[in-house]
Amino acid sequence: MMIRTDITKTAAFTGHRFIRYKDRQRLKTNLEGAITACYHSGIRHFLCGMAAGFDMLAAETLLAMKANYPDIRLTAVIPFRGQSCKFNPTDKERYSSILGKADNVVCLSETYFDGCFLRRNDYMLERANRIIAYYNGEPKGGTFYTCRRAERMKLDITNLYKPHLTIQTHDYNKN
């Protein structure tokens, strides 16, 4: 199903599947800051490719933030039905929970095929004007592909893979 949204109010998540345990809390804090910054710039819709690692952490963070920002929406963009079949049991449970809470779920194919993950990334890039990434700079893999393509498309990129950076969050609800 194609979801029509205002591209100027849409951001997409992309990032590596592996996140060191010691980096998770800082990354979650930085995600909250990046999502809040997007929100205050007018972005209300977020696309997530639902891979294990950064994607699911981003989706969970966004869903938790709905308590303070009830008008934000999450669309889970899954490359093929059964994407989670090789996930570990914990990630399968997280995946199922996120899909159950997402505002929309877009399934691009009924079955796996070579290139389906890149097709999913292209789908998200074509529908967003900004990406929030967790990209280590290595010139290989799907996150590299997505960040490089986003640069070529002149999309705004917020890269949270900065070992010593913590994005400051602001409580805009306080006077």
Image: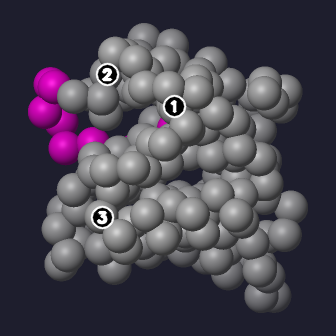
Closer to the camera, 161 or 114?
Answer: 114
Which of the two discs, 3 and 2, sits closer to the camera? 3
Label 2 secondary element: helix
The residue that label 1 is drawn on is 79
- Residue 84 sits above or below residue 30 on the image: above
Q: Is there any visible trace of residue 62 in the rendered image? A: no
Q: In this rendering, would 70 be left or right of 26?
A: right
The answer to if 135 sits in the magenta stretch is yes
Give amino acid for label 2: Tyr
Q: In this rendering, would 174 be left or right of 126?
A: right
Disc with the residue nearer the chain's start (2 vs 1): 1
The magenta region covers 131-140
Q: Give percent across and percent down for residue 154.
A: 51, 17
Q: Give percent across and percent down for residue 127.
A: 68, 25
Q: Give percent across and percent down for residue 15.
A: 35, 45
- Report the disc number at residue 88: 3
Seen at 33% across and 56% down, the residue is 87
Closer to the camera, 18 or 28?
Answer: 18
- Per the model, the C-alpha gap separating discs 1 and 3 is 18 Å
Q: Give percent across and percent down for residue 142.
A: 30, 29
Would you identify the image quadrant in which residue 1 lies?
A: top right
